[in-house]
Image: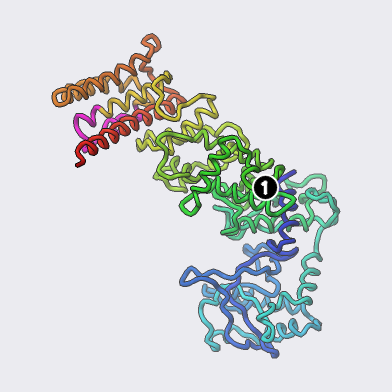
Amino acid sequence: MSALAALVRAYDRMAARGEVPPFGYSRTEVGFCVVLDTDGAPAFPPIDLREGTGKRRTGKIFNLPTPLVQRTSGISSNFLWDKSAYSLGITAGSGKRTADEHEHFKSFHQRLLAGTQDPGLATFLRFLETWTPERFNVLGWQEDIKDANIVFALKDEYHERLLHQREAAHSIWMDLYTREQASEAQCLLTGEVGRVARSHPPIKGVWGAQSSGAFIVSFNATAFTSYGHDTAPISEASAFAYTSVLNRFLDRGSGHRLQVGDASTMFWAEATEQAAADAAEQIFASLLAVNENTESKKVGALLEKIAQGRPVSDLKPELPPGVRFHVLGLAPNAARLSVRFYIEDDFDVIATRYLRHLQRLRIEPPPHEPSPSLWRYLIETAVLRKSENIAPNLGGDWLRAILADTPYPLTLLSSVIMRLRVDHDVNALRVSLLKSILIKNFAMEAPVALDPDFTDKGYLLGRLFAVYEHIQEAALGRNVNATIRDKYYGAAAAQPRKVFALLGSGAGNHLSKIGKQRPGHRVNLEKAIGAIMDMMDPGDDPFPTSLSDKSQALFTLGYYHQRNEFFRKSDSADAAAVSETAP
């Protein structure tokens, strides 16, 4: 099943629950409602429908007749609602064409509603005939109305319904919405015969895309036509269905979206019973987006149980086997959207793949955050840890690899190595990323914690570098202007031969100083150097001219393990000293 066909199937289920708008309508923010008296005059100042406080107030969401045209530079009116420039003829801007927009709004409705017998629509026509933009200031209406979306209602029924919700208005709207359509054809998504959509509704909410919306399916040149067809064979109903579902998933707080790098990622479950689909979506959101607002202890317990071999369906009584799960990643591409990835499989399969990924990320000592999100890991690959500096495509490619159980993108490896060379911040998040790549892409058994028997050259060199750094700290303290990590980490990981001779010479001087004050400590440090050097093969060039990216990842892993082993021993020694001096 294609992604669009799956979205159409999701629309049918969501429409039955009232979660998506009916055909011909779209979810739109509305700021104010103008209430009309029977003579067409405003009954009282517009009702403020916005929610929230201060400058963060947002409009209330209504299902409104969808715009007939995606407005760019032209003038086109919406049916029985619009922004204030069209509906009232007033705007907070320069208003160079506001008069033309308002005149179009009036003539558009006068043509559609001519001869109507509906009292509500007749009242609206009287409003259009009598209203002038100058009355806005005469009536003393608030400035916030300018440029907000406006709807209309009658005085005696504004509590129950708006003007566009009247049956007569719906009938006129559906006749208009389906009037000018292309010839019928078999729909590519459903297989049913229907009117082919000449254009598809815009999709809003994709991070980085145009705020007015972008398109997955669109044609703007004859180069895209074939065999006399100038559009995709997708029915208007199907086009409306898949875009409505996407717009609903992309809403803030929908519970169906995650942002992974530049990929706006949506997910949904398909099951016979809604409770099973809800449970699957809840688990998936918890796995991928654990943060300070998530109950990480519950998620951790879930991961532990699954790591013990229990299938996901055993952990939720309402989650039977065979729940189908869909994950779709979209990214902006000018006025269009690129489908970065689409994964469809049984939920148990997808969840197990992700849990195997978490297992590959395990590192000791672990990150300070109990369960870092994917976004938190991606930040570690970016310059200055700014989200806008994350490499294009990296987030989407990484998530696709995780969910499809394919090798990770090597740009992830190169990005982490580059950040380590520049800022020398060897932290748990970066090290765990490198470890997971070594396991997945290079089929290695990379150790979780310090492994004294692991003989890889890169790993040993990283450990040796950590020993040299510890020797410097023991001799000079930690308050030096620049440690050997600050000066030499990048060069030592990339070109060991240039650096390690110098580091060894400096370590000899530092050991001499340590030996004068703590001879036993000097002996232990010399043993640590000797133990690592003994594992190196002298005939295999222990200090090569350069290391590959794979070996540099192992260098970082070895350095992290060895350095934290020193910290662990130091903490243990401090605790022992405290216990000995305690009364």
Q: Position of residue 102 (x, y in %)?
A: 64, 77
Regarding mark 1 in the picture, which secondary structure is present there? loop
What stretch of residues is rendered in magenta?
471-491
The quadrant of the picture occupied by the N terminus is: top right
Q: Residue at x 72, y 52 (%)?
A: 273
Left or right: residue 523 versus residue 400 is left
Looking at the rendering, in which quadrant would you find the C terminus?
top left
The residue type indicated by label 1 comes to Leu
- List x then y, in percent, for residue 173: 76, 71
Circle 1 packing at 10 Å, graded few (<14), some (14-19), many (20+), is many
Asked if residue 363 shows in the view, the reply is yes
Q: Identify the residue at the far bottom of this view.
A: 39
Residue in the foreground of this view, choosing between 454 and 75 = 454
Which of the 4 image quadrants contains residue 354?
top right
Residue 54 is inside the magenta segment: no
Identify whether 315 is placed above or below 540.
below
The answer to which image quadrant residue 339 occupies is: top right
The residue indicated by pointer 1 is 319
Residue 487 part of the magenta segment: yes
For image coordinates 68% across by 75% down, the residue present is 105
Tell me, yes or no, if residue 96 can be seen here. Answer: no
